[in-house]
Image (cartoon, helix red, strand yellow):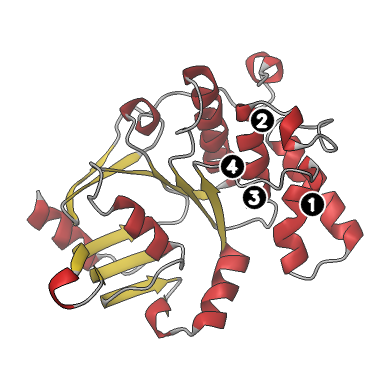
């Protein structure tokens, strides 16, 4: 399987994201730890991928590298045919700001700030005017099922609603790629499936590429491809032939959905 994965990866030059021979080493000398070892991975626009593996397998490190939150030690990272490892800090920040959205296990919302103001933050960093920010944030909240909740603070929202605000913040900038690191890790089963339904719809109906790190097979079952890391290497890379079916927005089921 490993040889097969490598041949497929080397043959594909049309990927949105391409990692070639990527190593990541933390520390130096006797304390050095190699988190990633010769990673080859292609991700195409519109994919919905789960990255899985045991603790310490390198899955979150790989996500951080794809998200330009961390750099590589060796190898090549290409995003839309741009060699990311050749960009300086400011250029990587611009790539994140204009193409990537992030959702983490912790919701990372400002406590005394309304849902809409939380969603507006990345738009503020882009320098957009207040009226444009308000419109985009309101629309993003509506997309995640929180129309009417714009002025509520995190303390007035459930865990599932807070994660929806975090997702709205991530998609308000209309990113090409949504990076989700254990997005259901702090939620109960019901809320977890609601968040996965939302991510599936964002992928299938808006074409957002979703890359999700998870240790939960029930959540990975929603994705269409599962990449497993073991000891810093890609151990397997396989399609999910039967992803969980999600009802499109606009149906009676979707209209009745509530967090």
Q: Nearer the viewer, residue 143 or 61?
A: 61
Q: Position of residue 71 (x, y in %)?
A: 37, 73
Reading the image, the residue beneath label 2 is 161
**Mark 4 neighbour density, 10 Å: few (under 14) some (14–19) many (20 or more):** some
Q: Earlier in the sequence, mark 3 or mark 4?
A: 4
Residue at the spot x=55%, y=81% of the render? 91
- Judge whether 39 appears above or below 84 on screen: above
- First of labels 1, 2 by sequence position: 1
* Lower position in the chain sequence, tag 3 or tag 2: 2
Of the numbered discs in the image, which one, if any, rests on residue 136?
1
**Gap in angstroms between the C-alphas marked 4 and 1:** 20 Å
Closer to the eye: label 3 or 4: 4
Which quadrant does the C terminus fall into?
top right
Specify the label residue 197 is tagged with: none
Describe the element under mark 4 as helix, strand or loop. Answer: loop
**How far apart are labels 3 and 4 at the CA level?**
14 Å
Depicted 220 relative to depicted 78: above or below: above
Residue 221 in sight from this viewpoint = yes
Point out the tag, 3 or 1, that comes first from the N-terminus.
1
Report which residue position mark 4 lands on. 107
From the viewer's perspective, is 40 left or right of 30? right
Which is more toward the observer, 161 or 4? 161
- Give the mark toward the camera: 4 or 1: 4
Q: Quadrant of residue 93?
A: bottom right
What SS does tag 3 mark?
Answer: helix
């Amino acid at each position: 399987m490993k040889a097969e994965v490598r041949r497929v990866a080397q043959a594909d030059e049309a990927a949105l994201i391409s990692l070639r021979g990527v190593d990541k080493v933390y520390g130096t000398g006797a304390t050095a730890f190699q988190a990633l070892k010769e990673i080859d991975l292609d991700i195409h626009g519109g994919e919905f991928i789960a990255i899985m593996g045991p603790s310490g397998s390198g899955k979150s490190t790989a996500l951080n590298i794809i998200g330009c939150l961390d750099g590589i030690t060796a190898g090549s990272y290409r995003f839309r045919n741009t060699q990311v490892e050749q960009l300086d800090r400011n250029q990587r920040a611009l790539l994140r700001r204009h193409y990537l959205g992030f959702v983490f296990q912790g919701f990372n919302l400002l406590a005394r700030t309304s849902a809409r103001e939380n969603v507006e933050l990345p738009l503020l960093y882009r320098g957009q005017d207040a009226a444009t920010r308000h419109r985009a944030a309101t629309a993003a909240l509506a997309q995640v099922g929180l129309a009417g909740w714009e002025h509520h603070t995190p303390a007035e929202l459930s865990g599932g609603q807070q994660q929806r605000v975090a997702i709205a913040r991530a998609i308000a900038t209309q990113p090409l790629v949504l990076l989700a690191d254990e997005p259901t890790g702090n939620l109960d089963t019901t809320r977890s499936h609601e968040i996965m339904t939302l991510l599936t719809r964002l992928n299938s109906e808006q074409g957002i590429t979703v890359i999700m790190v998870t240790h939960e097979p029930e959540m990975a079952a929603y994705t269409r491809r599962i990449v497993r890391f073991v000891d810093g290497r890609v151990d397997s890379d396989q399609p999910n032939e039967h992803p969980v079916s999600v009802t499109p927005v606009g149906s009676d089921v979707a209209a009745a959905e509530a967090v």
